[in-house]
Structures are given as structure tokens and as C-alpha cells.
Image: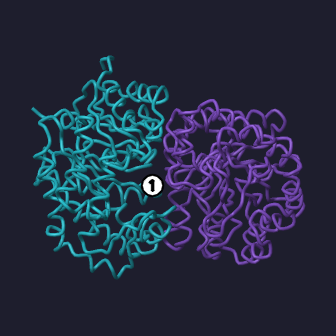
Chain colours: A purple, B cyan
Amino acid sequence: MAKHLVSVLRGTPSWPPPIWLMRQAGRYLPEYRALRARAGDFIALCTTPALAAEATLQPVRRFAMDGAILFSDILILPWALGYGLRFAEGEGPVLPRLEASDIARLDPGRLEAALSPVLEAVGLVRAGLDRDTALIGFAGAPFTVACYMIEGGGSKDHARTRTMAYRQPLDFERLMAVLTEATIASLSLQIAAGAEIVMLFDSWAGVLSPSLFRRFVALPAARIRAALGECFPEIPVIGFPRLAGGLLGMYAEISGVDAVGMDTAADPALVAAEVAAPVALQGNLDPAALLAGGAAMTAEVARIMGALRGRAHVFNLGHGILPETPPTHVAELVSLIRNSADAA
Amino acid sequence: MAKHLVSVLRGTPSWPPPIWLMRQAGRYLPEYRALRARAGDFIALCTTPALAAEATLQPVRRFAMDGAILFSDILILPWALGYGLRFAEGEGPVLPRLEASDIARLDPGRLEAALSPVLEAVGLVRAGLDRDTALIGFAGAPFTVACYMIEGGGSKDHARTRTMAYRQPLDFERLMAVLTEATIASLSLQIAAGAEIVMLFDSWAGVLSPSLFRRFVALPAARIRAALGECFPEIPVIGFPRLAGGLLGMYAEISGVDAVGMDTAADPALVAAEVAAPVALQGNLDPAALLAGGAAMTAEVARIMGALRGRAHVFNLGHGILPETPPTHVAELVSLIRNSADAA
């Protein structure tokens, strides 16, 4: 029998819904902070099998989540393609600012070897999980990875990326093609190593105009979905084009993903109308409501659960857990969901 | 006869549409950079009548825009309420991080005197405009102003603001009420001084969950719209809840604004279906497409114009002009719109 999370992602409604939380492994947990201090640098934490596996398992051990998501980072992919990356204290990731001439130097040939510690971590996590918890493989979506490479790190408006997409469409398409194929390879390897679900994080999808969104968010997701479907038809794919707004329906239709992640701003009732069943919906409690806890959190949970009655729904946040979140609030949230009396 | 821009904002379709651009006064113009250097500090530029008027008029002189938007800043309102503000070189605005105890110290009594140089600028602009160009008054919407005050400046996720909204709802409501009434006062004074249209900029509306969006974005806009409507029934109000995504229809319905601004990510065809006429639609060319120019810009313009045929539409960007934009591209865009042969 399929695990609860897998079955809902394949389109079967269930009450109460399964739950896991984006960035459930992270700084809000004291055991994570201890592990992070031991690892020294962030890339080392992602690429040392025992440490990445331990970070992945910590929240599952504490909260008995329905899903364990591989502890990783969006930028592990360009790193594995040989693109320079470091994490600067307090300012996030720092990369070279990509020029068109850098694209040919990205090396898919080194991907499998470079990812081997990550795949070893997948194996360790799988061995450490109980029979009810599903392991979710991790990838940044090509557009978001491209954003970090072109901007050389984070950005307020990703203007350099969008301008390149308009001005050098052929270079941009070439970069997207390399990243899309590398994403397919990385997720296939994660599945082969034990991932039972995969999720595509497109954090910056919301900065694009509808025409660029279609080309660089929805179509690459469709290519990834189709390629994985050929080899692994049983593995659900969750797509999370953050801040897609009114374009989420188009994304679901074009991409063919099994489930869409809803960000904090999404109205679940509207999304349920726009994205046809059996596509599952995942989300979308405001991480600030989890941080605040109490009556505000309870009211927001009730609103979301009420809007998605009868729909295949995976409870999650609309964005990652905030570092200041009390772990007790996470325990309360899990208990609130699991004890929902109201049958769908 | 009403000016072209005013008539379209009141709901009358027109072809070709009127055009103006968000941040049309700004760093991409050499004459603005010279003015900015003369003013020294940014607040001085906003609050010295001759300088603010000159910044407002520069792009109208160059491009014969249909609208001139008062050169100002979202943070002039808290500044006028006596809340500390400075602009740090290269890092944007810096304010004290608001605590609940600060709310009672905001002083609406000083607003009119503090805003007098701004109102004098409005009068100078009005005197300097030709008979076809409409003057647009400017205000940050209460939620976005609250964000800057609570975060003490810009923020990646506005987590402190959202957490306060959940945890201290009464304090938050009190702050929103003060800012909403002050916004009504500021816009009323601008109208009395000569503004023929007003626009509410809610730059951070997209970080809110649907329930908070309703309370802190849509309802305050409704209060502002209603209050202005009592005294100035002929003055159109444009609401711009940036990144509202699927919530734009709800915003238009609740707020009662005459026009909604569409951000870059909005699909004009979807918005036209969600927001019922006669509400006018404004936007939404990607500023990066304007920066890139050429065929990419032409294609994006054609897509937007095609989607809004027959609808009351004001051509604009989806966000402010990027500082690297060549002024020649702006001239080309205006000419492209004005020479649109295709009748609606």
C-alpha cells in the first residue's frame, strides 16, 4: 500500500491530510544549529552524507512528519556542474555573475560524481525512515537556478535575468536547456537512490511576465515531468512556482505535475477552482502565522482546511519555516491537523 | 471635456490608450540625475517645491506623457507624521523599527503643515502642465507604509510585519487606522492643490495571506476610496496592490477603486475576466522588456494591447522603470503605443 503522502499526491483525497513543512529541517531547531556548527560550512552540510541525512531526519524524529525532504540547496545543481559557489556569512550565496560564454563551460559530465555524496545521503535517509514516512527528492527549478547564476546571488528584482531573457533569448534558452536536463538527471539519480516523490522549487517564478513564465517556468516543468514519467511513472512530482498568482492554473495544465504547491498569498478556494482534480494541492499556511501560533494560527488553519475539503491536499506552509519559530508551535500545528475531527 | 487619462480611468475605453510610466521621473534620465545631485538628499528633493515639481515635469516634457505623477516617496507620509526617516546611501530608507508604543506618538496634527511643500509642488506642477496632461497624486497604501515602519526599512519577507499582524492584531489595526486616515488627509490635500487623479501604491500587498490581504489591503483601500468619493466624486482612484495575484478581483470588488494597476506577473486577459468593467486596467509591460527594447518589447506590447482590446486601459509598466533603461526606449514605447493602427 502506498504511503499516505504518496497516495494523496497521486490524487486520492484523505482526511486529515498528510503534513510536512518546507524548511522543516532548519535553524529554528536547536539540534539543527548544533549540526550546522559541526559541519562548518553550508555546502559541507549538504554534501557530507551523514550530516545531510541527519539534518533531513531531525524534524521527522521530532514531529513524525508524513514526508522527509532531502536537506539540500537550490545551488547544489550549479555547484555540481562545476559553477563556483560559496556562502558568505550573513549575505547568502555568492556565485560568479553568468555571462553567455560561461554556458558552454557547464559540465553535465561531472554531475553524477559530484552528486554522489547527495545520493549517498538519500540512501541513508531512506534506511533511517520508518515505513510510513515518504522521502521527497529536492531540486531548484531551472529558472530559479538561472536567476542565482545570472544575478550572482540573491536579487531584489532579478532585472539582469529578465533583461537577458528578452535581449539574448538564444543564450537564455541554451542555459535553460542545460539546467533542465541536469535537473532531470539529478532527480532521476535521487529517485534511483530512494526518493519516492520529487519537488521542484521555483522560488522566483513570480517575477516573470506571463509569456516568459510560460516559456521558462511552465514548459521546463513539463519537460522534467515528462522525462521522469518515462522512467519512473509511479513517482509523483510536486511543482512549486512561487508567487505564480493567477498563472498557477496555466502552470498545472502545461506542466502536468501531480501536485502544485500554493504560496502564502494563494487563496486555496480559488486555486481549487483553477487547478482541476486529480491534481493535488499543497500548502499554504503563512509561516508568520506558525511563528505567532495561538488563535491566529488556528483560524488560518481552519480557513485553509475548509477551502480544500474533499480535495487531495497535503498540508504545508506557503513558504519555509522562519528561523524564529518556536518548535512547540510546529508540534501544535501537527497535532491540530492530525486531530481535525471534521470529516471531509 | 475630461483629459484623455481621466476619461479612461472613469471607464471609457479609448484607442490608442493613454500612457504614463511608473517611476517615469527617475535615475534613467540624465536631467533627473543632475537635479538629484543639486538637491543633495532624497527627502530634500521630495520636499523642496521647485525641485519636486521639476522632477515631476521632466519626463512629461521629454515624452509628452498623458499623466504626470507627483514626484514623491511612500515614506513621506510617516515622515510627515513625525516618524524618523533617512535615506542611507546604497541601502535605501532607514527608519526606527516600530513598537506598539510608537503608534500613539504618530501625530496627525502636524500632517498638513509638514506636507505644505509637497502641496506647493502640486500647485507648481499643475501650473506647468499643458491642458492635455493630467496630474496624479501619490500615496503609499497603509499596509506598505506599515511594512517599512515595522521592518525599519526594506525587507525580504516582511516576517516581522506579518507576525505582528497575527500576534498583536489590535495594535496592528490601530496603526492601520492612523495610516489610513492620514492617507485620506494627504490625498485630499493633494486633490485640493490640483491633483486630478490619485494612486495608492501597495508594493508589498503580495506577501499577505488572503485573510490578511482582505483586512489590511482591500478594506483600507475601500475606506480611502469611500472617504475621497464623498468630497471629490469626480477624482478617479487607481489602486495598485502589487503581486496580488489571484486576489486582484477581490480587491477591485471590495475596494471600489476606479482602476487597478496590474503588476508584471499579471496576465491582462485573466485580469480582464476577473475585474468587471467599468473598472479600468492599468499596466503592465515588464520594465526589463523596456530596458531590452527592440523586438522583445514590441512583442510584449502587442500581447498586452491585444488582451485588452475594447477595455478601458491605461498603458503603463508592471513596476517602475529600471535605472539602466535607455531614454530612447521610452520614446520608442510611447511612439509605438500612440501609433497603434489597430482600432479596438
Q: Which of B72 and B227 is in front in this view?
A: B72
Residue under the point 25% across and 42% down: B258
Q: Which of A81 and A293 is in front in this view?
A: A81
Q: Which of A103 and A309 is in front in this view?
A: A103
Q: How crowded is mark 1: few (under 14 residues within 10 Å), some or many (20 or more)?
A: many
Q: In this view, does A248 lie to the left or right of B341?
A: right
**Residue, disc 1:** B210
**Residue A137 % position (x, y):** 77, 51
The kind of secondary structure element at disc 1 is helix
**Residue B168 % position (x, y):** 42, 75
Quarter holding residue A333: bottom right
Q: In this view, does A124 lie to the left or right of A68?
A: right
Q: Nearer the viewer, residue B228 or A91?
A: A91
Residue under the point 32% across and 43% down: B260
For this orientation, the residue located farthest to the bottom is: B101
Q: Is residue B260 left or right of residue A225?
A: left
- The residue type indicated by label 1 comes to Pro
State which chain disc 1 sits on.
B
Residue under the point 83% across and 39% down: A232
Quarter holding residue B248: top left
Number of numbered markers = 1
**Residue B46 % position (x, y):** 25, 60
Residue A312 seen from this side? no
Residue B5 seen from this side? yes
**Residue A80 % position (x, y):** 80, 50
